[in-house]
Structure formats: structure tokens, C-alpha cells
Image: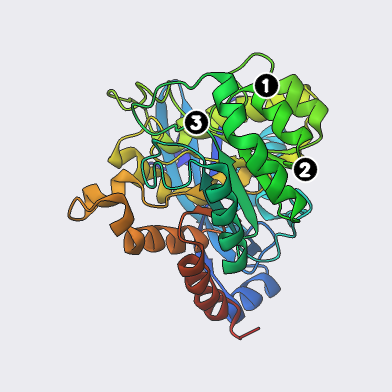
Amino acid sequence: MSEEAPAAKAAVSARDGLYIVPLGIVSSTSAELAVGVGRGKRLAGGVLAFVDCEMILRRQGVISAAVTPVEGVRPWAERHGAAFLAQVEARIARLTRPRPPFAGLSLDRPRVMGVVNVTPDSFSDGGEHADPASAVSHGVALLEAGADILDVGGESTRPGAQPVPLDVEIGRVLPVVRELANRGALVSIDTRHSAVMAAATQAGARIINDVTALRGDPESLAVAARSGASVILMHMRGEPASMQEGPIYHYAPLDVYDALTERISACVAAGIGLDRLCIDPGIGFGKTVAHNIDLLGRLTLFHGFGCPVMLGVSRKRFIAHLSREEPPKERLAGSLAAALAALDQGIAILRVHDVAETLQAVSVWRAIKTGGVS
């Protein structure tokens, strides 16, 4: 990216592509002091604050960027006119406002979603819990380990995965969703098919987690809207079977942001309010290792939507690529490293396989960032 300051360019307008990346993240007493003297703003209303902003403009494929202190954002924007100032102020407001509960779950601390794969071919634990009774037992164990949400899936979306017939997917997940919901769990249904969404929400799922951001099935938007469920919109380029065949982006963080902007607009138009939405940049879904790293370094950008951000990095392939090509179950350390880096950028929900280990790491992180123990 060019580091030429946007202010040095020709006059900008509210129609230009504007992106704001909070930087200079501080916590504990430093956050209190920065916010108190007007030199910092709370990130998503949480325990972290940011003291700098990377202001990015993209016009006709050209990206320009500059870093400015928080107190310098308004003077910079004012130089470009009232319409542009209004756009900047609206974005800052979305970056800073406290997040309401998601699916009834308070976001006053990082939350952990445990993965329950009812599949024979998932990349990390394929076949271990393909039997409904085993999947329920695994879900209960994750709850006992401290999981806040259980994400039940009956179709693998790993790279190269083939579609599963709807009746098979429904047969896999429905008894698991129903039993876990009956036991009081907050259940998410991990599916890209409207028929599965409808069946699972009727069985007690209160969250729909769709890797296609409700675009993979023409009925998904309407079904999700009618269900009243909260929705996680994940970014994926292409289809699972082919998504890793040479994915190309101009600049992944901005391209993913633009794609999710369109999906949020579609949801709101369909009657799914922002208070029901959470977004996920989709690490590993139609992205190279370099794309993943670019995204993980700019996660604060995604708070600009004004809704919670979830991240799934657990046991993913990029970890092995950056390390020693370990198999999925030997990627815990890398998973935790990526998760903690995400927490340092205000991520609200972590989707993980190793719930107990993640919660231990989150507990230590939280004590450090809040300056105390609870």
C-alpha cells in the first residue's frame, strides 16, 4: 500500500472508499488515561482503547493511507468537506459504541464458541463425533469446559469438501441441536442451506452461522429473517470444493470488508437488524496464507460495521504452513497465538475446538488487560 497521506491527494468525497483501522491499542490504566484526556477512544466499547487511526482511501484501485492520532481525525476530515466529515464521524461511532448482547449473550468479555462437528470428514476431527450420541456427549463436555456457544455442523466446508445431500445434513444435526438446546445450551447451526437453517432453528438453535454470509442459498435471507435467530456472516470466496484454487485479492482486508458491507446491507434490507448480526472475516476460506496474515493484522478494521466480530483460526492449515507442517491436532499453540492476537484487537467471539485451553489463555489475557482478577 502507498503510505502517501490522503490529505496530500486531491480533494476526497463521501463516495470514495473510506476505511478506518484503529491502531495503538492500549488497555487497563493506559486506556483509562487516554480516553479521559481525549487522546483515545474505546474499541467496541470494551476494555481496549485506541490512540491512533490508520485512515485508508481507495479510489479507482489506488490505495493511500496515513496514520493520525485520534484527536487529529476530525481536523483531517474537516478539510475534505461536511459530507466526508459526516462519513468519518459515523464510522468512528460504529468503531467505538458498546456492543449489545448477541443472541442474548452479553459481550462484556470475550466469548468462546465450541465446535461440534457431526461429520465423517471435517479437517480436524472427522468422524470422531459423527454419531449423534457422541456429538451430544462432546457438546456437553465443551459446555462443562466453559463454552458459551456450541456450533453444530453436519457438512464439512474444509478446502476440497463436496456438498452433502440436505436430508443427510438435517439427519446429522437435528437430534444434536434439539438435545443440546433442551439441555440449555446456546446452539448455533453451522450451515449454508436454508432448509437446514429452518429445521435447526425450529429445533432450538438460536444462531445461524453461514460460511456464505446468506448468499449460498436463495432462500437463506428470508428463512433467517423469519426465524428471529441471530446470524454470523462469514466471508468466503468461491465454494469449499474450489475456494483454495488460486484466490486473488487486490488487498484482502479491504476486499473482505467491502464484501461483508454488501452482505450486511442485504440482511438489513431483508429485515435482519444489525443487532442480530455478527461478522467473521473467514480465515482460510478462499485465502492464501498471505491473505490470512493480512487479515489478522487488520482485524480492528472490521469493528467499523458496529456489530460483534467472530474469528475462527483454530487448528487451521495456515498455522502448520507457518510452522512445521503439523497435523490439525498438533496446532494448539499456533491456534492460541492467533486467538490472543485477535483478542488484542477486540474480537468478541473465538470459534475453537480446544475450549478448556482457550479459556485458560483468555482468563490470563483478561487479567492482564483489565489490570486485575475476577
Q: Which residue in the structure is indicated by mark 2?
A: 275
Q: Which residue in the structure is indicated by mark 3?
A: 155
Q: Give the image location of residue 29, x and y in percent.
A: 60, 81
Front-lying residue, 17 or 78? 17
- Position of 272 relative to 129 (above/below): above
Q: Which of the image's four quarters has the N terminus?
A: top left
> Which of the two discs, 3 and 2, sits closer to the camera?
3
Q: Amino acid at mark 1?
A: Ala
Q: Which corner quadrant of the image does residue 263 belong to? A: top right
Front-lying residue, 56 or 85? 56
Q: Which of the marked residues, 3 or 1, is nearer the chain's N terminus? A: 3
- Please tell me which residue is depicted at 74% across the width and 55% down the height of the picture: 183
Residue 242 visible somewhere in the drawing: yes
Q: Secondary structure at mark 3?
A: loop
- Please tell me which residue is depicted at 29% across the width and 41% down the height of the picture: 289
Q: Give the image location of residue 296, x and y in percent.
A: 41, 49
Front-lying residue, 338 or 74? 338
Q: Which residue in the structure is indicated by mark 1?
A: 195
Q: Which of the marked residues, 3 or 2, is nearer the chain's N terminus? A: 3
Q: Which of the marked residues, 1 or 2, is nearer the chain's N terminus? A: 1
| Distance from Cα at disc 3 to Cα at disc 1 | 13 Å
302 relative position to 159: left or right: right
Do tag 1 and tag 2 residues touch (Cβ < 8 Å)? Answer: no
| Distance from Cα at disc 1 to Cα at disc 2 | 24 Å
Q: Amino acid at mark 3?
A: Glu
Q: Amino acid at mark 2?
A: Asp
- Position of 269 relative to 203 (above/below): above
